[in-house]
Amino acid sequence: MEGMIQAEDIVGGEWAEWYRLSPLQRWHISSQLWKYCLQIGGSLDPEPDTESPFYDGRTGTPAPLHAQ
């Protein structure tokens, strides 16, 4: 495979490993990460995009748990 471009050359080792997984494997790992995020007090709510033309700063969002 001399002269062939490897994924690590483009995206680095960790991302190359991720890309080699099947979609089903990536889905499973992602679901585990979301569960962990919720266990440590995270949220699945997206961060507000203040640069979006649809952003409305008048609507309030609850403060994150770590800010209280």
Image (tube, rainbow, N blue to C red):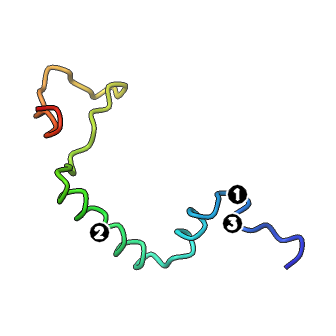
Left or right, 29 with reference to 8: left
Residue 37, compared with residue 58, is above or below; it is below
Identify the residue at horizontal 13%, vertical 26% (top origin). Answer: 59
Q: Say which residue label 2 marks.
A: 31
The label shown at residue 67 is none
Left or right, 22 with reference to 52: right
Q: Say which residue label 1 marks.
A: 10
**Percent position of residue 55, x then y:** 26, 27
**Percent position of residue 17, x then y:** 57, 70
Image quadrant containing the C terminus:
top left
Closer to the chain start, of discs 3 and 2, is: 3
Q: Which of 27/16 is in front? A: 16
Separation of residues labelled 3 and 2 (CA atoms): 24 Å
Residue 50, compared with residue 47, is above or below; it is above
Q: Say which residue label 3 marks.
A: 7
Answer with the quarter of the image where residue 28 lies: bottom left
Identify the residue at horizontal 10%, vertical 34% (top origin). Answer: 62
Residue 26, compared with residue 33, is above or below; it is below
